[in-house]
Image (cartoon, grey):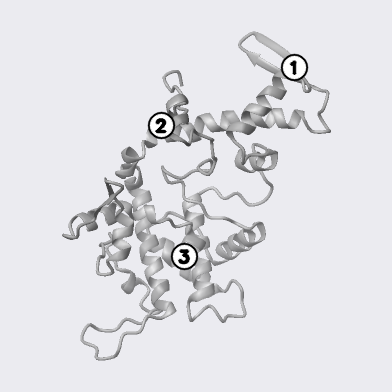
């Protein structure tokens, strides 16, 4: 699910937390004398723990897709063997619940919003870091051979100042940014910042629907017994299954078979990458800003925290 749908375990962290807290298991541990809690670790260590997902529709997955999966009766004497098709079924079930949480706004109500101070983190990653990266990009571009010697104009209200690209100010700013963001370079910044020019070709307007189309196709084509040995890369049957899955999730669309095939061809051509815009995950979450490490450094240099009062 992580590979095909960009699934992350934190999507179900609230259900895992509730399950663990009501299990009767001692899920709190002391590390260096400090009482800590790791709900996911406890959930993984106790194989009997399960949580119930909410079906996004009145009809169950087994009813909707009974022709594609084999379900044994509870009274069956046959030995239960987990097949690839069973795993596909479970993945589709869990992703249907992930969509239900996205569609009903449950992700924004997660307990980790407060636990991780995500209100601050959201402003940091969605407003402050893009501004920092944009300025850093200007400085780095001014140092390239193409722009060396040209002027950089900084504007504030009615005031403007022209700075030569080889001037002390830009040199000092570049040094400052390199010390704070050692993993960033011009190429990485260009990847992180949004492309305002846009790209030619088909527009992927509904990100979540595209994630489900892409992930379901990859899951079926690579793992389901009916599709994985098919000589046809994007068959009508697999396209119809995807449409049925979107209908099952009550996702509004006007797709027909030919649309799905064309959509997937374009996705394959462009190397589509699924991404869920969870409140605790975003394009800038992997930026490493250097902070004090040793105890003495922390005493003398407190963690950098921006003042958001004026934003």
Is residue 134 visible in the rendered image? The answer is no
x%, y% of residue 222? 53, 74
Q: Quadrant of residue 158?
A: top right
Q: Quadrant of residue 191?
A: top right
**Disc 1 to disc 3: CB gap under 8 Å:** no
Q: Earlier in the sequence, mark 1 or mark 2?
A: 2
Q: Residue furthest front?
A: 296
Which residue is under mark 2? 120
Tag on residue 163? Answer: 1
**Disc 3 to disc 2: CB gap under 8 Å:** no
Q: Nearer the viewer, residue 310 or 95?
A: 310
Mark 3 surroundings: few (<14), some (14-19) or many (≥20) residues within 10 A: many
Which residue is under mark 3? 243
Compared to 203, does 263 lie above or below? below
Q: At 53% across and 44% down in the image, what residue appears?
A: 286
Q: At 38% across and 33% down in the image, what residue appears?
A: 119
Q: Nearer the viewer, mark 3 or mark 2?
A: 2
Secondary structure at numbered mark 1: strand
Q: Earlier in the sequence, mark 3 or mark 2?
A: 2
Q: Quadrant of residue 68?
A: bottom left
Q: Residue furthest top?
A: 158
Mark 1 → mark 2, Cα distance in angstroms: 33 Å
Secondary structure at numbered mark 3: helix
Check the picture and name the quadrant holding the N terminus.
bottom left
Mark 3 → mark 2, Cα distance in angstroms: 39 Å
x%, y% of residue 219? 49, 69
């Amino acid at each position: 699910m992580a590979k095909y749908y960009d699934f992350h375990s934190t999507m179900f962290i609230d259900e895992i937390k509730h399950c663990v807290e009501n299990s009767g298991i001692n899920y709190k541990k002391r590390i260096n004398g400090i009482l800590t809690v790791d709900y996911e670790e406890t959930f993984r260590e106790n194989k009997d723990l399960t949580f119930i997902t909410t079906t996004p529709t009145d009809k169950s997955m087994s009813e909707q897709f009974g022709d594609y999966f084999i379900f044994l009766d509870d009274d069956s004497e046959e030995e239960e063997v987990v097949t690839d098709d069973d795993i596909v079924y479970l993945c589709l079930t869990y992703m249907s619940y992930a969509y239900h949480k996205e569609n009903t706004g449950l992700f924004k109500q997660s307990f980790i919003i407060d636990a991780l101070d995500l209100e601050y983190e959201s402003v940091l990653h969605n407003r402050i870091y893009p501004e920092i990266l944009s300025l850093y990009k200007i400085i780095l571009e001014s140092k390239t051979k193409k722009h060396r010697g040209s002027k950089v104009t900084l504007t504030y209200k009615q005031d403007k100042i022209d700075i030569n690209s080889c001037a002390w100010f830009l040199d000092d700013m570049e040094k400052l940014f390199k010390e704070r963001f050692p993993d960033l370079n011009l190429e990485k910044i260009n990847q992180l910042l949004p492309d305002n020019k846009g790209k030619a070709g088909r527009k992927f307007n509904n990100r979540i629907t595209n994630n489900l189309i892409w992930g379901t196709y990859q899951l079926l084509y690579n793992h389901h017994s009916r599709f994985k040995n098919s000589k046809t890369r994007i068959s009508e049957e697999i396209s119809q299954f995807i449409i049925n899955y979107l209908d099952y999730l009550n996702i509004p669309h006007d797709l027909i078979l030919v649309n799905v095939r064309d959509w997937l061809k374009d996705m394959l051509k462009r190397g589509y990458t699924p991404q869920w815009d969870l409140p605790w995950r975003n394009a800038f979450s992997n930026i490493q800003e250097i902070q004090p490490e040793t105890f003495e450094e922390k005493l003398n240099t407190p963690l950098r925290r921006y003042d958001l009062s004026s934003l």
